Amino acid sequence: MILYKYVSFKTAVSIVKNSTIGFSCLEDLNDPFEGTSAHFEDNGEVPASTVANAVRNRMSRGFGVLSLTRTPLNPTMWSHYGDDHRGVVIGIDVDSANLNSSETNLVPAKYGDVIYSSTVPKKQLPQLSTERLMAVGSEIEAFEEQDYELFKRTFLYKALPWNYEEEVRVVKNINSNSSSRYSESSFENKSGEWNTIQFQGRPIYCLSIPMESVKEIYLGCSTYKNISRLGFPEQEYSEIKKEWRAKGISVFNVRQIKNNWQLESYVHNGS
């Protein structure tokens, strides 16, 4: 199954060169209401609101989220995440990239469809024991059916206006005993091999993936005419595309369909 990631041209070059894909913490995503759909029963011992806040905090720092989508030709996604149509969409085979495995993903891609709703779910989750609460964000490393409802509420519910994204998420454990949130470092855990970088004051957890899992690249309809402004001379741009094709990646251009608001892809050996 191929899913897609909208990025800038510069980021696409880095992804292919380093064979990595970036995960972000829940608190660093662009929706401030991430993780607020998990509500718990009040058992009289610990206030339900305290448990909800603790779960959200531990989930946010302990796990990384990779946001993918189902189509490379969504004009709104190009505007919001594809650098105003000057960027790139990367098609990733999630099976080849080990993003569908239940052994290394808390939420594999096959279970990661985001649920869009007009109201916050009202059903309360069972209260967590102190032991279970302490395990959240550190000890959970693989998909477990008993935890899916908790992770679904935390990571997979969003407000209805976001439904244009058609988002599919992958959630992984990003805990490391040897690095902090604000340091650049490399580490390995059961979820994979990681390289942490800082981008605009927040950490990006770059997961190593097999090069052959990058199957497709789509160049935005404004990429070529802005390539020098993006910091890439035309000759270098041509060489980069040749390198991508040499790696077995299918490279497409994107354009507007004549007399239509929709986009289409096509193969062009030139620009």
Image (tube, rainbow, N blue to C red):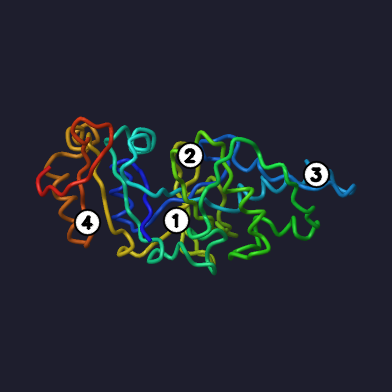
Left or right: where 5 falls relative to 105: left
What is the quadrant of residue 177 in the picture?
bottom right
Q: Earlier in the sequence, mark 1 or mark 2?
A: 2
**Residue 176 image point, x, y percent:** 57, 59
Q: Are marks 2 and 3 in contact (CB under 8 Å)?
A: no
The residue that disc 3 covers is 48
**Numbered mark located on residue 163 in the image:** 2
Give above or below for 75 relative to 24: above
- SS state under label 2: helix
Of labels 1 and 2, the one closer to you: 2
Q: Earlier in the sequence, mark 3 or mark 4?
A: 3
The residue that disc 1 covers is 195
What is the quadrant of residue 257 in the picture?
top left
- The residue located at (64%, 64%) in the rendering is 145
The amino acid marked with disc number 4 is Ser
Q: Residue furthest left?
A: 270
- SS state under label 4: strand
Q: Earlier in the sequence, mark 4 or mark 1?
A: 1
The amino acid marked with disc number 2 is Asn
Pick the quarter of the image with the N terminus.
Answer: bottom left
The residue that disc 4 covers is 250
